[in-house]
Image (spheres, coloured by chain):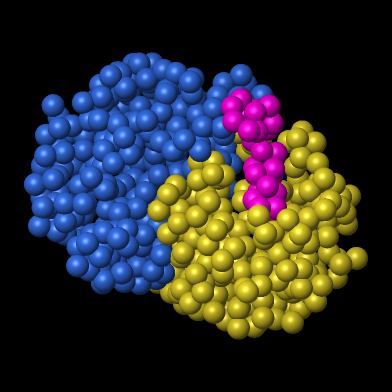
Chain colours: A yellow, B blue
Amino acid sequence: MTEQFGARLTAVIEARGRLCVGIDPHPYLLDAWGLGDDAAGLRDFGLRVVDAARGVAGVVKPQVAFFERHGSAGYAALEEILRAARAAGLLVIADAKRGDVGSSVEAYGQAWLTPGSPLEADAMTISAFQGVGSIAAPLELAARSGKGVFVLAATSNPEAAAIQTAIIGSGPRSGVRVAAGIVSDVMHWNRRDGHESDRVGSAGVVLGATVDFAAYGIDTDEIGRGQALPVLAPGFGHQGAGFYELEARYGAAASHTLVSASRSILAAGPRGIGAAIAAHAAEVAA
Amino acid sequence: MTEQFGARLTAVIEARGRLCVGIDPHPYLLDAWGLGDDAAGLRDFGLRVVDAARGVAGVVKPQVAFFERHGSAGYAALEEILRAARAAGLLVIADAKRGDVGSSVEAYGQAWLTPGSPLEADAMTISAFQGVGSIAAPLELAARSGKGVFVLAATSNPEAAAIQTAIIGSGPRSGVRVAAGIVSDVMHWNRRDGHESDRVGSAGVVLGATVDFAAYGIDTDEIGRGQALPVLAPGFGHQGAGFYELEARYGAAASHTLVSASRSILAAGPRGIGAAIAAHAAEVAA
């Protein structure tokens, strides 16, 4: 039987900790690194991050938008980076925030989560604006292939609050806030038939570190109790939260919370990045 | 000054009507068309649809997920299809449903809406799960380049209702349902400084034809009054709504509503598709 993503994630965290290194080739960073704003620059940037993360961090997260910006050539660079990262033993989360319905969202799942596909990653981020029910196909595909999905729930940007704290008025999550409803739906999925006793779920959520979880109706202790829910946590470093706040903010969920850091690491440049990753990993572990 | 998307859309509708032909290379359709489930199959499929739509319909809408499924090679096929469609005088909406924040969502906008970029389209679909404020960069980029954006508001799948009808509890849209808040935000953007007198807005929304708009707090007569709001309408044909219902369902908004049809056209196969597009265009115009 295929090893489930929750178990793979746990092993990575035990071996290398909870730091997730963003691969975000912003145009200004490409320039600062002495690279061109083109597919070759993207490739060199990403391979350098992978090389620096190897053996020091456990997880990398390429931001797909910066590759899409360069069209098919950008995607070819991303394919090479994904292959190199997985060959280096890193767990790779494609930060794609894809969402759609039916066979379209299934196709997005196939793009990123099918073993042997050109864009194969270990997990992807997904947006459930069309309902958690709409993303059943990629959730099922992920489970079959030992892959993971992180569903956006409470993101770290302030403009998101209005929608993500809105109160659901119909269906099984009636009376609950949108973000909390998504968290419950994903936890429910993780405890489906045959997976009630998994120690860690195979689908996770995105919960930004700058969010007031109580105001979103989310109890981080509850989501860490019993079967743990994997969390991907942007909002540290450049965006405002301190790494020392990880346990205080995420409560019992902290043990399976991946701390995403991008610009605060990437700003160190191609020569300083190895030391920056090690320093961040130590801070997250402290 | 660059011609705004609202004016371009109006001209296309006046010349060719409101039918929007989906370019959705589902694996089962590729098979039915005698094409391989690979980049060459995608390319042949898309170019055939473009050729059949030329001069008969005004708008085509490639579903990006089916191209992403084949990685960089799929994107290379899509680039060729986008170029061919624009060269054929068709208005091209990239159905990408992208969403993110800050420089990431800006990069998605640049990918699809920058003149001369490899994936240049005339408009793209965007998801605002992270708030309409989070997509300011692509909205501004679109306006500068005469491009359009269609923001998901009330989609046609039933699982979307819980989130899209949830009631916002904070900010300027407090008390309003999520979908209606997005519609208001996009209308507000269209009426920004210097664009109060545009006859048609340059940003639009996605409103599915199977949706009970009143239950979502959306008044389709209001959105068609004064400055018209462009609407992209999935849910016709295969998904359930009849074309004859267009005016009844969309009220005053119907004049700038693009009727999206995919499977009901594409099922006609490579030889029947020209006639199918013409028949659909006539039905929409009736």
Residue drawn 32% across and 58% down?
Answer: B26
Left or right: where does residue A114 sit relative to residue B57? right
User: Taking A84 as reference, is B9 above or below it?
Assistant: above
* Nearer to us in this view, A157 or A18: A18
Picture layout, residue B77 above or below residue A90 = above
Q: Given the current orientation, which residue lies at the most extreme front position?
A: A194
Compare residues A238 and B158 and report the one nearer the observer: B158
Quadrant in which residue B19 is drawn: top left
Residue A31 showing in the rendered view: no
Name the quadrant containing residue B196. top left
Which residue: 68% across, 27% down?
Answer: A175
* Position of residue B68 in the picture relative to residue A232 (left or right): left
Viewer can see residue A3 = yes
Instruction: Work out whether B156 lies above or below A31.
Output: above
The stretch drawn in magenta includes residue A177: yes
Residue B53 or residue B198, whichever sits in front: B53
Instruction: Give the x, y percent position of residue B243.
Output: 22, 30
Residue B191: x percent and y percent?
A: 42, 25
Instruction: Report the span colored magenta.
Output: A166-192
Q: Residue at x 33, y 39 (%)?
A: B239
Image x and y of residue B89, in percent:
16, 49
Percent of width and height locating residue A256: 78, 60
Q: What residue do we see at 52% from left, 57% from top?
A: A138
Q: Quadrant of the N terminus of chain B?
A: top left
How many numbered badges does the structure rendering display? Answer: 0
Left or right of A5 in this view: A106: left
User: Is residue A258 in the magenta section?
Assistant: no
Q: Quadrant of the C terminus of chain B?
A: top left
Left or right: B79 in relation to B186:
left
